[in-house]
Image: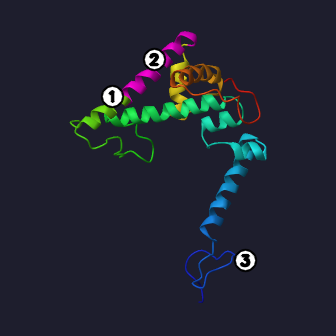
Amino acid sequence: MNKRRGRKRKAGASRRPGGRINYGSKRERIEDMQRVVKEARQRVYALSKTDAAAMPETSVLGRLVATGEISRRQYEAAALYGEIVRQHDIMLGAKGLPRAGDLERQGGHDNEDGTSAAYRARYRHAMARYDLCRGALREAASDDALAPTVVDAVAIADWSLPDMTPSLRIGLNHLARALGVPPSGGAIGLGVGVG
């Protein structure tokens, strides 16, 4: 019996002297991964090659800005809002909801006791930015009652809510104004966003 243990070797794969597959340099592997991601974006989101390459990230917001459903300004406001909420949660010591595969998560705290002047200044700054955002979303609720909830669901939880895109635009426009995100000249990608 001359059988090898394990699975059969790939035919035609270039190998290192020790028998392992030679995957190339780190740069080649990164380029290969980026190529695969761009091809997947084209296939899944029905984007052109240039739109798939211009997509800022593979998330609900990234898809919305790449397909022109939201503007670049709205995307930047959502990203900034997400960072503000994350900083707010860290300062409060809040832990997010556990997700499948991460039920024993320990993040969320900054290991400070709250006595230093620098900590108190960071805390006041984080709370002021968060309050500014929540005020803008309360104002958006006067235009569309669902806007604050939709913005939180899409920008923070990364949920896809395609029927709620108008509410998302309204909420993100209010956030962009409050946070001082400059107008961007429209959306990247296929359609025309609201900016």
Between 141 and 44, the one nearer to me in the picture: 141
Question: Which residue ends up furthest to the top in the rendered image?
Answer: 142
**Residue sitting nearer the eye, 38 or 122:** 122
Task: State the quadrant of the N terminus.
Answer: bottom right
Sequence order check, earlier mark of 1 and 3: 3
Q: Residue furthest right?
A: 48
Residue ID at (74%, 42%): 51
Q: Which mark is residue 12?
A: 3
Q: Is residue 142 magenta?
A: yes
Q: Secondary structure at mark 3?
A: loop
Asked if residue 87 lies left or right of residue 33, the reply is left
Label 2 sits on a secondary structure element that is: helix
Amino acid type assigned to the residue bearing label 2 in the image: Gly
Q: Which residues are magenta?
A: 126-144
Q: Are marks 2 and 3 in contact (CB under 8 Å)?
A: no
The local secondary structure at tag 1 comes to helix
